[in-house]
Amino acid sequence: QSALTQPASVSGSPGQSITISCTGSSSDVGSYNYVSWYQHHPGKAPKFIIYDVTKRPSGVSDRFSGSKSGNTASLTISGLQAEDEADYYCSSYTSSTTYVFGTGTEVTVV
Amino acid sequence: QVQLQQWGAGLVKPSETLSLTCTVYGGSFSGSCWNWIRQPPGKGLEWIGEVNHRGGTNYNPSLKSRVSLSVDTSGNQLSLRLTSVTAADTAVYYCARGFSASGRYPNPYFDSWSQGSLVTVSS
């Protein structure tokens, strides 16, 4: 199974909005709404921030939102803050009944 | 609040077997599915496989021939064995709980993670 494709890096200024794309195929993102997103500060445990494409777990800031169109899912971070600087990964269920992660995106707050 | 704590050898020789164990504190061990995920240095996350409380397993096809997951429900533990390791298996390994919003399979989300441990394959 091939990793989902994400941009290597995205940057934005404090207060701005940024969007991270996650492109898969009709065997994963395009066929299932089992898309999730994770925030990972290096050296720490990844944090679960979006599931079912658009839903936020309890306690996750509403500045994080998800969407999907066709084979591409997206994560938008609005009101960018310094603490949002981290790596972000998408994940999807696949038609092989396995799970696949994205290649990861480094978010920089400039 | 679920907490996952893992341990195992941090250095493994090429061609030998990597073994890690993860203990789950809090939550319902028997009501969940448990995963192993890894991150090679400078690379992204890779799902290794999942195991339920009955010992049923599901593996990443790229690792299936070398990986074995098991559970010990009496000790709330899950274990990973990866045989015939090479330098490409050097990574930070995580255990994580699988979560299903519907309460039914699949459990496609990883809502609680361990801190991770670096396993280096080197002679």
Image: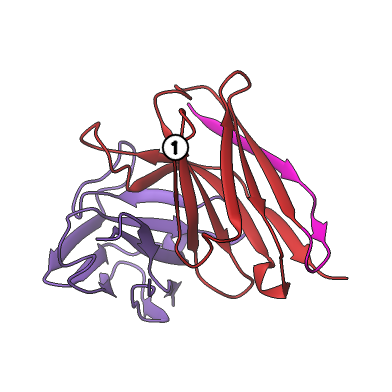
Chain colours: A purple, B red
Provide residue A40's location: percent of width, then percent of height: 49, 59
**Chain ID at mark 1:** B
Image position of B70 with respect to A100: above or below: above
For image coordinates 51% across by 59% down, the residue present is B64
Magenta residue check for A52? no
Q: Circle 1 sits on which residue?
A: B56
Label count reads 1
For image coordinates 67% across by 39% down, the residue present is B21
The residue lying toward the viewer, choosing from A83 and A20, is: A20
For image coordinates 50% across by 70% down, the residue present is B44
For image coordinates 21% across by 65% down, the residue present is A29
Image position of B12 with respect to B86: above or below: above
Q: Quadrant of residue A104?
A: bottom left
The stretch in magenta equals B1-16
Relative placement, left or right, of B80 versus B45 is: right
Q: Residue furthest top?
A: B74
Magenta residue check for B4? yes
Q: Residue furthest left?
A: A69
Mark 1 falls on what kind of element?
loop
Q: Amino acid at mark 1?
A: Gly
Q: Quadrant of the C terminus of chain A?
A: bottom left
